[in-house]
Each structure stands twice: as structure tokens, then as C-alpha cells.
Amino acid sequence: MPEVRADACGFILASNYNSRPLPAEALVRGDKIALIRKRQTIEDLIRDEVDPIW
């Protein structure tokens, strides 16, 4: 198995700046990997936006 590097503050520093979806987040324990947060989609990103009726 290849060596995996992890950053303890990786996701906490993620943002939607410039309308970028947030990345997926995985938890690694020994040789086990689990997805703990799905990647954000564009639909997720704009779901709560409202167009003004002008």
C-alpha cells in the first residue's frame, strides 16, 4: 500500500470561494478508509440561492 499523507486541518480550511464545491472527506484508520463527507456538487452549492424578482 502506498504511503498516504494526511493534513489535520485540510477540510477546515476548505471554502466555497469563487464558487468552488467543497471536497470529499475520508477517514483513514490503519488499512481502512471510510468516506465521511461526500463531495459537494454544484447543485448543493447553489441550492439556497434566490434570484431577486426585479
Image (cartoon, helix red, strand yellow):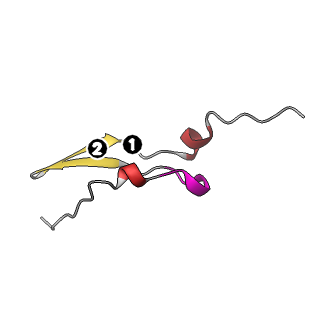
Residue drawn at the location 60% of the way across and 52% of the way down:
19
Residue under label 1: 38
Badge 1 amino acid: Lys
Q: In the image, which disc is placed on residue 35? A: 2
**Residue at the image point whose x is 9% and y is 51% from the top:** 30
Q: Judge whether residue 20 is colored magenta.
A: yes
Q: Residue at x 77, y 36 (%)?
A: 51
Q: Along the horizontal axis of the image, is 40 left or right of 31?
A: right
In the rendered view, would you say 17 is above or below 46?
below
Position of residue 45 in the picture relative to residue 50 (left or right): left
Q: Position of residue 22 (x, y in %)?
A: 46, 49
Q: Quadrant of the N terminus?
A: bottom left
Q: Which mark is residue 22?
A: none
Local SS, label 2: strand
Cα–Cα gap, marks 2 and 1: 7 Å
The x and y percentages for residue 44 are 54, 39
Instruction: Check the image and report above or below for 9 versus 38.
Output: below
**Was residue 17 drawn as part of the magenta stretch in this picture?**
yes
Most extreme residue toward the bottom is 2
Quarter of the rendering containing residue 37 = top left
Rendered-image quadrant of the C terminus: top right
Q: Are marks 2 and 1 in contact (CB under 8 Å)?
A: yes
Please rate how many residues cluster around mark 1, counting C-alpha atoms within 10 Å: few if below 14, some from 14 to 19, many from 20.
few
Residue depicted at 33% across the width and 48% down the height: 25
The boundaries of the magenta stretch are 15-21
